[in-house]
Amino acid sequence: MNIKDFFYKLNNESKDSHEFILPNKESSSDKLQPEKMLKNRFVYNNLDVNLEYVNSRFNSFLNSDVKIREFLIHVKSRQYKAFILYIDGMIDKNSINDFVLNPLMLRTRSNTYEGSQIISEAIANNIMVRKRKKFNIVDYILDSLLPHNDVERVKSFDKIADDVASGNCILFIDTVNFAFDIDAKKFDKRSIAEPKNEHVIMGSQEAFVENLRTNTSIIRRNLHNENLVVESLTIGEDNKNECAICYLKNVANSDLVSEVKYRLNNLEIDYLTSIGELQQLIKDDIDTTIPESISTERVDKAINHILQGRIVVIYNSVPYVIVVPATFLDFLSSPEDINIHHFFANLLKIIRGFSFLITLLLPGLYIAITTYHCELIPTGLLFSIIASRSNVPFMVIVEIILMEISFEIIREAGVRVPSPLGSTVGIVGALILGQAAVQADIVSPILIINIAITAITSFAIPDYIFSFHLRINRFLFVLLGFLAGFFGIGIGIFVYLVKMCSLKSFGVSFLAPYAPLTRDKGNGYLLDSPWKREKRASYLATKKSQVQKETSMKWRKK
Amino acid sequence: MNNLKLNYLESAFLVVIVTITHLILNMPNTLIETTGSASIINTIYVTVLALLLFSIIKKLLDPFENNNIIYVAEFLGGKILKIIITVLYLAHFIFISAILLRNFAEFLKIIYFPQASLWTILSAFLLVSLIVNRLGGKNIVKANAILMIPILLTIVITAISLIGKLEFNRVFPILGYGFKETFFNGATNIYAFSGILYLLLIKPYLKNSKNFSKIGYLSIIISGIYLVLIVSALLMMFPYIQLGNDTLSVYLSTRIIEYGKFMQRTDAIYMFVWIFDFLSYLSIIVLFITQISKQSFNLKKTPLYSYIVAFIIFIVAMLPNNTTELEFFETTIYKYSSIGIVFVVSFIVLVLGYLKKKKEGNKIRYEVT
């Protein structure tokens, strides 16, 4: 190849190769028309029209998993054309074969029986009087030919489309202007496993899974109360995913239930794929990163909240549920608290309270003390800090931000790397790099201690989202500490506190029961002994405030 | 009338914060300067006076149900008196907050920010009070109630930590400059309870107005206890002649507190907590200014009004040319303006309003019979 050819090729090579540019917008607007036309239709009397419509709506010629099986039904020696519609992989094939196709297609005593159905019979004056039901194909099929436990009549194709997408099988019969919606779902799903992110030592080891029905059944299985209500609704237009709200009808505040339903029913979105999105879509104050609902994978935690009078929102395809309303104290409480002696639990709660303060404030306080309030540090320690920082070329704020960001990177990498490598990243990142950074005089050892303590305490916060919020806000306090020492941090805390006071979670003050201050029993941060947990939190305004009688340990009384 | 509804403790702490803020600054010095070694007795005496005065105020406000002194002024002298009283109160609030703000800012500048300009510190305070006022008045009061716990605790800790350094013979002679100075001239020290002004205004904002008397008594008792505590500690700590020349004696006393070898200088920690106190106090003043202006002038654009108020506070705070002038404003003008507005003008309005109400009541009764 000579130079001329080389340059020619260099200039023209791209023109020869395939190039695809995605247009900004679908150019033809009339392409949307058929989709619009397909909406809001009802089942026709004519099977062929129905079939054609279904083929068009479900793109059955394109979709390999949308199955349509045409067949003949035998009813009283007469034959009707019919077809079933389902999505392969989402139904129980055996159930469809045995309890739908078999009884309808095969000639059996049921479908060849010529007589009419007897409703009642009576003998009067030696004369037998029999009341017979007038023959109706639909009733006959439903009563005698479909031995299935969940069959519904549906008329709207929109409902049919939703149900097929969720795994139901639809039966269409000629001359009938509605379809039979048969619930024969069966698909592979993850079995109930241990919680992955919310470990406890003594508590239940059951966690929610992705399937909504499995989740509601776990709750039902663990909460034996006929007042437990599981209401279903769908969220999303393009992806109509199921969502359930669970509460105790005789405990939860009715207005609260209505508010949760109101918010969930008024989400105008095409699709929703995560519980985090849902949490943000239903929160009161959208300007803050403070979470206003609890997300949990633990069944026992969710049940405990339902029993307290809160509402649990379960969203299909997510192994986490949302609990509302939530207060600040809930984010510092762990499901382990009720499993251990209340004295230990309270000790842990106090430790978590300190962890909250340290996570939020420690780096900021460090910078404030070393920059503005050196007199707080004993002279010996102050000399040692100054000596350790003497060779560090950065200002203390740069040093802190550098280390904080490095730590966040290590944490993020630790989450992303495959699990066998996770510990390696931790060791390399934290130990080797930290040690090397100190030896290279990039950072001071005291700062490493500071950052490490902050990082560890952030893990002591039971709620992941809340911990995240603290980690982000920590940078703000670092900046304030750098700018104005304790004065700056004081300003930050004051504004933060007023902001927290302004927050509400579904009508409940975020800082309840401390702002506004209530002295009712059962509200406090610290746990009472199990025999003194007599009342539900008053800020939840439950229908039933009493949890146990004043003397719960009746056996102690003689 | 508005959406600011306060519960029992939140309201009581509103009054307490005023006393505590003044306590942290120069009020103990002024009290001790007036009555010398009799300050403890004098403080107890003015606390009792304040309680008595409040019981009279309560009695005078009773016929007006859920209304405050602004309403009484309107009832007594129509819109003109209402506006006069409102303007007087606004001027008082703005003056006090500006002087205290300047004092605290000067103090922070001397101790921590010698390089910073005064207006920066003043602006920081006012900016915060504006931000939190945007977040809602109710939330400031809630935050104040939470912050009162550490604030009150630090003062108790200060007093306890000083026990080893106190000289008890400094309380003698027990009657200080004499009986007359302690009980007659010393009665002017009742200005320490100028927080009563909030009690005159707070009634419409209460969730349950039946708690009004409880709120008043509780707040005066808490304030009184803390006054006695700090005045006693300072009196026994420093010679009272020296105290007259010192500023920020409470802060000075924290500088000598030691907790073992590790914590030899803890004043910054106390200061940290007192910053909350001051921020809370300033935000509450801006809130009250906005609320009473709303009530009297039917204001709609309160955020804009808050900005104007903050700006005026800033201007007034910048007025004193030096610390001597500032001290004069704080110890003399503030003292007598508080007495004049809170204990004289308000009292007269209340008494006349009460008499008018009673007269009208009798008239109605007479007409009915």
Image: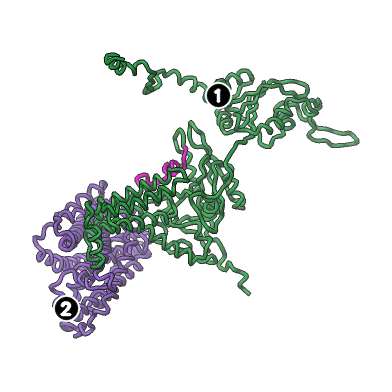
Left or right, B94 with respect to A320, comes to left
Residue at x-position 20% and y-position 67%: B25
Which chain is in purple here? Answer: B
The percent position of residue A427, horizontal first and vertical second, equals 40, 51
* The label number, if any, that marks residue B234 in the structure image: none
**Total tally of numbered discs in the picture:** 2
Real-space Cα distance between discs 2 and 1? 94 Å
Q: State whether residue B359 is above or below residue A121.
A: below
| Amino acid type assigned to the residue bearing label 1 in the image | Asn
| Amino acid type assigned to the residue bearing label 2 in the image | Tyr
Q: State whether residue A495 is above or below residue A211.
A: below
* Residue in the foreground of this view, choosing between A276 and A229: A276
Q: Residues within 10 Å of mark 1 (few under 14, many from 20)?
A: few
Most extreme residue toward the left is: B321
Can residue A345 be seen here? Answer: yes
* Residue in the foreground of this view, choosing between A408 and B165: A408
Residue at x-position 24% and y-position 77%: B232
The percent position of residue B59, horizontal first and vertical second, equals 31, 69
Check disc 1 and report its element: helix, strand or loop.
loop
Which range of residues does the magenta coloring cover? A273-287
Discs 2, 1 touching: Cβ within 8 Å:
no
Which chain is in green here? Answer: A
Left or right, B146 with respect to A301, comes to left
Closer to the observer: label 2 or label 1?
A: 1
Q: Residues within 10 Å of mark 2 (few under 14, many from 20)?
A: many
The way the protein has been coloured in the rendering is: by chain
Q: Which residue is the site of mark 1?
A: A63
Most extreme residue toward the front is: A1
Res B200 quadrant in image: bottom left
Circle 2 chain: B
Circle 1 chain: A
Q: Which residue is the site of mark 2?
A: B240
